[in-house]
Image (tube, rainbow, N blue to C red):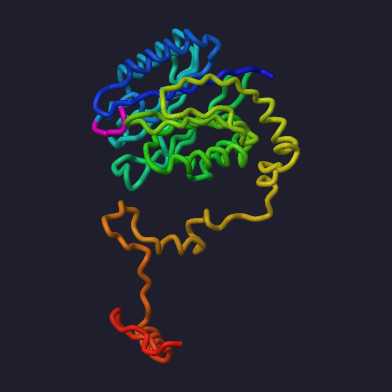
Amino acid sequence: MTPFAIAGVQMYVNALQPNVDGMLHRLDVLMARFPWTQMVMFSELSPFGPLDKYALPHENDVIDQFCEAARRYKVWLIPGSMFLTSPVDGRIYNTALVINPDGEVIRRYAKMFPFLPYEAGIAAGTEFCVFDVPDVGRFGLSICYDMWFPETTRELTSQGVEVLLHPVLTGTTDRDAELAIARATAAQFQCYVFDVNGLGAGGVGKSLVVDPTSLVLHQSAGQEDMFPIEVDLSMVRRQRETGMKGLGQVLKSFRDRSVDFSVYDRTSTTNDYLKTLGPLEIPQQGSRAGLHVDVPADAEAEERNHKRALGYGTTPFEGRTTVG
């Protein structure tokens, strides 16, 4: 076993003022309390909160501050994510950085699945994030809503990712569903999952660490928390070889599958049903979308005749005319 300690930081996030100083302060406290920590991750959009009006240029002084902190403590640092404006297309991306212990940004990951329709105006990234920690193992990064699409984790683990780093910002009623998805992801893809949420404008907390057997190693409550967890990547490799608890070898089974999934072929008609679901938009008050089914006129007439034959009225004010 090569021990490797990863710490999540669940902290209060302000929406209308920067949180960078607070993040750096908590990093100072974390490293004073747990100096054996080797990687630190904050929640999604923790530096500046959830409003894209605070988007920064692709390169900025805040990134330099985080790089200096990683270099000072000799840790891998994932400082949540930030809205950054691309110098190529001018669009805003929800972007996470991976900073190595030398203070170098080695990866930038733009969230593939912005939380549409609520995150309208945020562009979707197209590049996966995989990186190696020397003498430890392979890590991958996804952000919040990405995990609801198992294809993202499938791509990462098919490239050998053993630890999925997953900063989130969930302040909504679906947090419990996310926790179930995080546990299922760990079991389905035989990997560790570090799922770090924020507080206040940064979420409702309940950060989670899950091992490859779907065992919860730690779950935060609704207050600030910092939780270093030592991972054993030999456990990942053993489980992928022999199966979870000596049972399902899911990655091998997927590799050796006999079927190709036509739903992933955009030219096929397999997903025609999805095209009937209507536009991706925010529901309105009293919305009855999906509840109304058009009935052909002849079928309506047949239904009325059937009701009359049974003795039922044809308007809401007509009751049954006979008593059984």
Q: Is residue 188 above or below residue 162?
A: below
- Along the line of sight, the residue nearer the viewer: 139 or 116: 116
Q: Main secondary structure of the magenta part?
A: loop
* Camera sees residue 108: yes
Range of residues picked out in magenta:
49-53
- Front-lying residue, 216 or 212: 216
Q: Is residue 219 left or right of residue 85?
A: right
The residue positioned 46% from the left and 64% from the top of the image is 272
Percent position of residue 110, x then y: 40, 34
Residue 244 belongs to the span the image colors magenta = no
Q: Considering only vertical position in the picture, is 11 above or below 114?
A: above
> Which quadrant does the N terminus fall into?
top right
Q: Does 120 sit left or right of 275 as displayed?
A: left
Q: Does 304 appear above or below 293?
A: below
Residue 130 visible to the viewer: no
Rendering coords of residue 262 (x, y %): 56, 58
Answer with the quarter of the image where residue 135 lies.
Answer: top right
Count of numbered labels shown in the rendering: 0
Rendered position, 77 above or below 129 = above
Residue at image coords 34%, 24% = 47
Residue at the image point whose x is 35% and y is 24% from the top? 12
Classify residue 97 as left or right of residue 248.
Answer: left
Magenta segment includes 51:
yes
Q: Estimate the x, y position of residue 264 in percent, counting from the top left.
A: 52, 53
Q: Quadrant of residue 2?
A: top right
271 or 212, nearer to the observer:
212
| Residue 143 point in image, percent of width and height | 44, 35
Q: Residue at x 28, y 35 (%)?
A: 90
